[in-house]
DNA sequence: ATAGGGTTAG
């Protein structure tokens, strides 16, 4: 049969020229419409989906098809997002298909259009597809189910994602992985770990994709022990570590404070792409290892991997953390020469770089040159810069802008209040605090955690609910005495409360990281480093005190701040007091 | 014919 021969040719000779010849052949014969539609759908499918295909040709053939069948429609829908993930064409095609009412969508159609919706975060359109899934009775198809799940996860509607997930009766590794990655993406790390455990108890075998999601959750949480455990699991079960999994591991070890281990894994990646390089560079940057980060960047250039905008975020933040102002400016220019349009994140790095180098005036001018209006991060960076340099007026402006732009973020009030405290503007400080109260803002409590024997102990400032509170209090007292004997005077300007100095000193002693460090000293022995993860940035006094503790207790203390790492060894910190 | 994954400023 003619059709069979042509179908065979398309599968055996996937070549655009052959396709065109066949196409001509089909059109010059008088064949029944259904046969033409079938043959042309083969061509549409090939052109839209094959690596050697051509989506534009697919579209042309599709347009010439008398009654395109559902396979043609599906191929085109999928083909368009395969060439450009942000394309809206799949949605237009789907709409047209629905409007026409013929042929009717099948499970492939729904899965593909859901994927297209996830790519561009088209929430309303995806909702409509969901409604259609209900009506169509295809809701029990696994591909449609994971399509829906992934769609809600990507749109960050975790509630609806969970709802879809709960309704899946037979959950395969893909459904589980999608759910876990959805949790991880939203920072719901405990839910991610919980789902991972539940997956194992329901006897679904995790694969490398599952591992990537779990490892990412560890990176986010700074959960080193779990991360190590997962890494061991990967090795034990001989799960293939491809570049994505290796990159996730590099990132995890870096974000958990083991930069040496991150480097080791990075070294083992045979062919590194821009994401692998970026992870390494960002990792070195957050550790304050600016020179190494820049070295890595040159090696990346030598190996002819084109840096991405993310790579430059790493490079510029390395310069910022390392105080390398002129280098930072140079990389900024070379980034623009490479044709990378600076994003607000890149501007943010530069503003930070200038502020840390006490060039706050220049930082303000730089902000003026941005093609965007400053966002809260930029204002906060400026405000902190002004605080360090005691620049009352500029700081006040930044603070006002910040509160106007983001009045519902309690952190902003705290920052501005701290700023006024640091320049001894007590009235203004209490005004901010009053405003905060009136608007119902609660201070974000400092929270620090330490992982001991696979259990994460969380400490909140001033919270004494820990079962070993008594011992911790005692340990804190001893530490405070020894620190004080070492000649430390509390630096109290970061304390919120407008109270007497002595009392301020007491508040400082109860900062969450102090509790966590005290617990670490209580529970672990040298040479094991004490690793702390903190939700806020470290205050100046805690930074000083931790330096002293590292010396008098001869302990290495690694603190993961909200933005970077501090590594305290023998009385000093790797951040060189830049942070 | 189909589904899930890695890097991102303070």
Image (cartoon, helix red, strand yellow):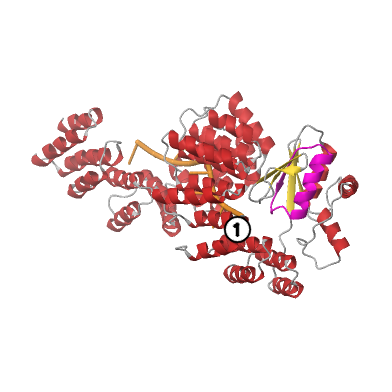
Name the residue: 80% across, 33% down: A526
Residue A492 sits inside the magenta stretch: no
Instruction: Give the answer, above or below, for where A142 lies relative to A346.
Output: above
Residue A532 sits inside the magenta stretch: yes
> Magenta segment, which residues?
A531-557
Residue A60 screen position, x and y as percent: 20, 47
Q: Please give the count of numbered marks on the rendered protein.
A: 1
Mark 1, residues whose alpha carbon is within 10 Å: few (<14), some, or many (≥20)? Answer: many
Q: Is residue A342 visible?
A: yes
- Residue A513 vs residue A399: left or right? right
Residue A244 screen position, x and y as percent: 50, 35
Please name the residue that numbered disc 1 is placed on. A355
- Residue A106 vs residue A229: left or right? left
Residue A46 screen position, x and y as percent: 26, 37
Local secondary structure at mark 1: helix
Name the residue: 38% across, 44% down: A107
Name the residue: 48% across, 40% down: A275
The N terminus of chain A is located in which quarter? top left
Find residue A233 and report its image quarter.
top right
Residue A467 screen position, x and y as percent: 85, 46
- Residue A465 vs residue A294: left or right? right
Instruction: Give the answer, above or below, for where A358 lies relative to A172.
Output: below
- Residue A509 vs residue A375: left or right? right
């Amino acid at each position: 049969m003619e059709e069979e021969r042509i179908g065979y040719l398309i599968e055996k000779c996937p070549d655009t020229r052959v396709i065109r010849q066949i196409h001509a052949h089909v059109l010059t014969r008088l064949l029944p419409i259904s046969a033409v539609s079938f043959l042309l759908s083969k061509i549409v499918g090939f052109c839209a989906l094959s690596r050697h295909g051509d989506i534009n040709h697919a579209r042309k053939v599709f347009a010439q098809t008398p009654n395109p069948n559902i396979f043609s429609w599906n191929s085109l829908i999928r083909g368009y997002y395969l060439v450009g993930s942000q394309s809206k064409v799949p949605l237009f095609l789907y709409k047209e298909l629905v409007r026409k009412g013929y042929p009717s969508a099948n499970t492939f159609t729904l899965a593909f259009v859901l994927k297209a919706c996830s790519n561009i975060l088209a929430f309303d359109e995806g909702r409509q597809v969901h409604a259609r899934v209900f009506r169509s009775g295809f809701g029990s198809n696994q591909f449609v189910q994971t399509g829906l799940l992934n769609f809600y996860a990507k749109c960050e509607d975790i509630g609806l994602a969970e709802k879809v997930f709960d309704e899946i009766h037979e959950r395969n590794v893909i459904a589980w992985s999608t759910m876990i990655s959805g949790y991880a993406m939203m920072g719901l790390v405990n839910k991610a770990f919980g789902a991972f455990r539940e997956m194992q108890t329901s006897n679904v075998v995790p694969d490398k994709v599952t591992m990537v999601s779990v490892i990412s959750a560890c990176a986010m949480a700074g959960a080193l022990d779990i991360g190590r455990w997962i890494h061991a699991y990967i090795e034990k079960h001989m799960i293939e570590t491809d570049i994505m999994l290796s990159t996730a591991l590099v990132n995890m070890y870096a974000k958990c404070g083991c930069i040496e281990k991150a480097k080791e894994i990075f070294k083992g990646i045979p062919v590194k792409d821009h994401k692998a390089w970026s992870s390494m560079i960002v990792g070195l940057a957050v550790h304050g290892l600016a020179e190494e980060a820049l070295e890595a960047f040159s090696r990346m250039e030598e190996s002819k991997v084109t840096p991405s905008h993310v790579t430059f975020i790493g490079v510029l933040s390395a310069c910022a953390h390392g105080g390398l102002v002129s280098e930072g400016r140079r990389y900024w220019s070379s980034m623009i020469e490479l044709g990378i349009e600076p994003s607000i994140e890149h501007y943010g790095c530069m503003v930070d770089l200038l502020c840390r180098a006490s060039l706050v005036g220049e930082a303000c001018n730089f902000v003026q040159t941005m093609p965007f209006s400053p966002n809260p991060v930029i204002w906060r960076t400026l405000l902190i810069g002004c605080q360090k340099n005691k620049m009352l007026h500029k700081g006040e402006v930044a603070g006002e802008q910040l509160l106007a732009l983001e009045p519902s973020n309690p952190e902003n009030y705290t920052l501005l209040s701290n700023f006024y405290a640091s320049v001894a503007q007590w009235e203004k400080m209490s005004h901010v605090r009053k405003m905060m109260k009136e608007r119902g803002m609660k201070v974000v409590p400092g929270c620090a955690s330490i992982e001991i024997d696979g259990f994460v102990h969380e400490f909140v400032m001033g919270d004494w609910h820990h079962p070993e509170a008594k011992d911790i209090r005692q340990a804190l007292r001893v530490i405070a005495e020894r620190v004080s004997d070492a000649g430390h005077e509390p630096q109290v300007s970061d304390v919120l409360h407008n109270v007497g100095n002595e009392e301020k000193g007491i508040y400082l002693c109860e900062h969450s990281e102090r509790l966590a460090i005290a617990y670490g000293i209580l529970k672990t022995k040298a040479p094991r480093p004490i690793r702390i993860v903190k939700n806020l940035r470290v205050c100046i006094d805690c930074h000083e005190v931790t330096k002293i503790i590292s010396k008098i207790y001869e302990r290495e203390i690694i603190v993961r701040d909200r933005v970077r790492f501090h590594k305290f060894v023998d009385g000093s910190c790797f951040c060189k007091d830049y942070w």
